[in-house]
Amino acid sequence: MDNDNIDFKNLWKQQIVSKPNLEEFMVQLNKFKKAGLKTYWITNAVLALTSVFLVCIWVFYQPQFTSTKIGLVLTILTMVVYFVVYNRLLKPSLYVGVVQSNQNYVQGLITIKKKQQFMQSTMLSLYFGFLTVGICLYMYEYTRFMSPVTTMVVYGLTIAWSALNWLYIRPKQMKKQQLIIDELITKSKEIRVDSVDDEME
Amino acid sequence: MDFEQLYELYWEKIFRLCMGFVNDYATAQDLAQETFIIVWEKQDTFRNEANIGTWIFRIASNNCLRQIEKQKRIIKTDLPPNLAEERSHSLEPQILFLYKCITDLPETDRIIISLELEDVKQAEIAKIVGLSEANVRVKIHRIKEKLTKKFKENGQR
């Protein structure tokens, strides 16, 4: 087919382009850097405040039972581990492999996403599991003096909250990750299938 | 070449590549901006292993491919919403149609044809995408055929 009559290159280059001047771009760049730092500090402040709060409970309420202390330690540890792992390992990097060819980059993304998915599903299971056990142990000392009905309500609500996390939030997170991986795999296959088709001709 | 020169030389090319990928002015602007943020962050790691154009186009095309992974855009440009539309209205229908046709192609094809239209050599395109040069040549030929057919069917000649 004759392509010469349509000058695609000429049409392509007529696209209107608005280019921010370099100063405007640098403002955006700094905003981006600051936004990253802000998230980092907020995450860590939340972790620190929660831990301080739990330590305060320990200091001011002087729990007597070992179960309460184990519960508190377990809850604090769970949060610390989760936040550390989340910050360090799950944080998606904008730059990993970005200077490789498209084919290698997409392959690399799949590997990273699979690792992240494994980490996230394992971590989420451990997080919710330990948190529930920690809270239940912690509550034991205080619910002992409550009426059986109140105890049941308190534990019922806690377990319902855990069930919601376990049965709704956890699968939802995992499904989201899986969708991303599936789309990336499809994309990677498209590149490969296309090239195999071409080689065969 | 320093960052300022790179920015001046490549912004328009990168913007058009992103526009060919998404056919949306504001998104293309965001993608171009993200590309240059990565270029800024990565500029020290460039060691002439490829020519600088290949290097930047790789970053830009990978950033486009990575779009799906992002739930939110990192940066939203401050372009007023109507402005982008006004810009497209002022363009000739043929240009709009070309960009629309390119966005309808599979993702790798969008990248390949955009680079070809930017006058990037086929050997370089092969390095950017990760296919053989022969493969790229065949693909470009096919894509141009497809585009010509669409233009003819749509009476855009």
Image (cartoon, coloured by chain):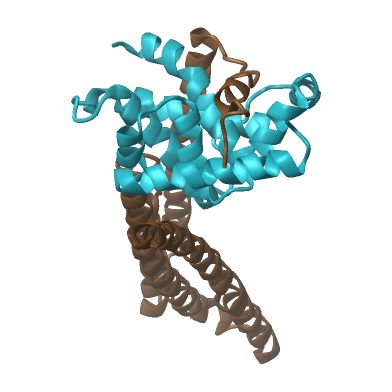
Task: Report which quarter residue A194 is drawn in.
Answer: bottom left
Q: Colour of chain B?
A: cyan
Question: Which image quarter holds the C terminus of chain A?
Answer: bottom left
Residue A162 at x, y = what percent? 57, 76
Task: Report which quarter residue A44 is drawn in.
Answer: top left
Kindly identify the residue that appears in the image at 32 percent across and 46 percent down: B134
Q: Using the rendered image of the protein, determine whether residue B143 is visible from the camera's viewpoint.
A: yes
Direction front: furthest residue:
A2
Task: Report which quarter residue B45 is drawn in.
Answer: top left
Q: Using the rendered image of the protein, determine whether residue A39 is visible from the camera's viewpoint.
A: no
Direction bottom: furthest residue:
A148
How many numbered circles are shown? 0
Residue B155 at x, y = what percent? 78, 37
The reply, left or right, for residue A35 in relation to residue A88 is right
Residue A182 at x, y = what percent? 49, 66
Comparing A45 with A24, the one in front is A24
In the rendered image of this protein, does residue B151 appear above or below residue A141?
above
Kindly identify the residue that appears in the image at 51 percent across and 61 percent down: A183
Question: Which image quarter holds the N terminus of chain A?
Answer: top right
The reply, left or right, for residue B119 in relation to residue B152 is left
